[in-house]
Image (cartoon, rainbow, N blue to C red):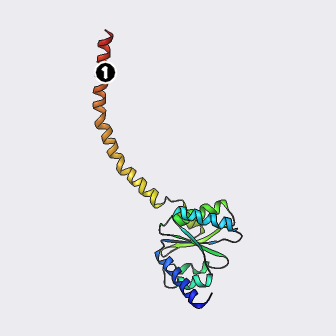
């Protein structure tokens, strides 16, 4: 890799860090190509990305970004999971690490807040942005559904009374 390619990679990584709401740093030592492909697929499905990076170039890319405090985590075979959704990358990384002990979550950062491995795991238990939106919509729609049900109940009761009365007359 020549100097120009390294500069392009650093610029690309810096852009990635600036666009991401969260960065999760992992060790991936021992993962096979198939397992790595599975990890990337799970990340993509969750709305996140996973990238194996060179530590020295990643530290250069971190300079001047809000994620600079995590540069100490880049030792050994590291990969980064990142996403615009603050929960997606953490959820996908922790989920994969539960099923495969070769992926170890080291920590990460959400904006300027540095998180250790336990912080990332706690973040992974939170609902994703889409789940929160669905819950909020459900809460907003619930009162309208209840109002419609209350308004329809008297009409239904009148219909049942009339039906019962007509059945009594037919029986007599």
Residue closest to the far top: 172
Q: Residue at x 28, y 31 (%)?
A: 154
Instruction: Name which residue lies at 51% across and 78% down.
Output: 67
Within the image, what quadrant is residue 129 found in?
A: bottom left
Q: Name which quarter of the figure residue 119 lies in.
A: bottom right
Above or below, 25 relative to 55: above
Give how far across and how far down residue 94 sits, in percent. Answer: 60, 63
Q: Considering depth in this image, is 163 or 161 the residue closer to the camera?
A: 163
Image position of 61 with respect to 156: above or below: below
> How many labels, in total?
1
Q: Nearer the viewer, residue 86 or 51?
A: 51
* Residue at 56%, 89% in the rendered image: 4
Which quarter of the rendering shows the N terminus? bottom right
Q: Is residue 21 left or right of residue 104?
A: left
Q: Name the quarter where the C terminus is drawn.
A: top left
Residue 123 pos. (x, y %):
53, 64
Give the secondary structure at mark 1: helix
Measuring 42% from the left and 54% from the top, which residue is drawn there?
134
As drawn, 168 above or below 40: above
Answer whether residue 121 is visible to the viewer in this image: no
The residue at the far right in this view is 30
Residue 1, compared with residue 150, is above or below; it is below
> How busy is the neighbourhood of tag 1: few (under 14 within 10 Å), some, or many (20 plus)?
few
Q: Position of residue 22 (x, y in %)?
A: 51, 71
Q: Is residue 116 visible?
A: yes
Q: Position of residue 135 (x, y in %)?
A: 42, 53
Residue under pointer 1: 163
């Amino acid at each position: 890799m020549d100097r120009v390619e390294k500069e392009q990679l650093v610029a690309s990584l810096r852009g990635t860090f600036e666009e991401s709401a969260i960065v999760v740093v992992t060790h991936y030592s021992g993962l096979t190509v198939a397992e790595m492909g599975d990890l990337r697929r799970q990340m993509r499905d969750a709305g996140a990305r996973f990238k194996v990076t060179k530590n020295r170039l990643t530290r250069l890319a971190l300079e001047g970004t809000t994620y600079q405090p995590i540069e100490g985590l880049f030792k050994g075979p590291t990969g980064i999971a990142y996403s615009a959704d603050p929960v997606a990358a953490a959820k996908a990384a922790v989920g994969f690490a539960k099923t495969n002990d070769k992926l170890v979550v080291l920590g990460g950062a959400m904006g300027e807040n540095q998180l250790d491995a336990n912080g990332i795991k706690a973040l992974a238990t939170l609902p994703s942005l889409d789940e929160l939106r669905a819950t909020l919509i459900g809460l907003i729609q619930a009162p309208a559904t209840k109002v419609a049900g209350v308004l329809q109940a008297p009409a239904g009761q009148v219909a049942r009374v009339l039906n019962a009365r007509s059945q009594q007359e037919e029986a007599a």
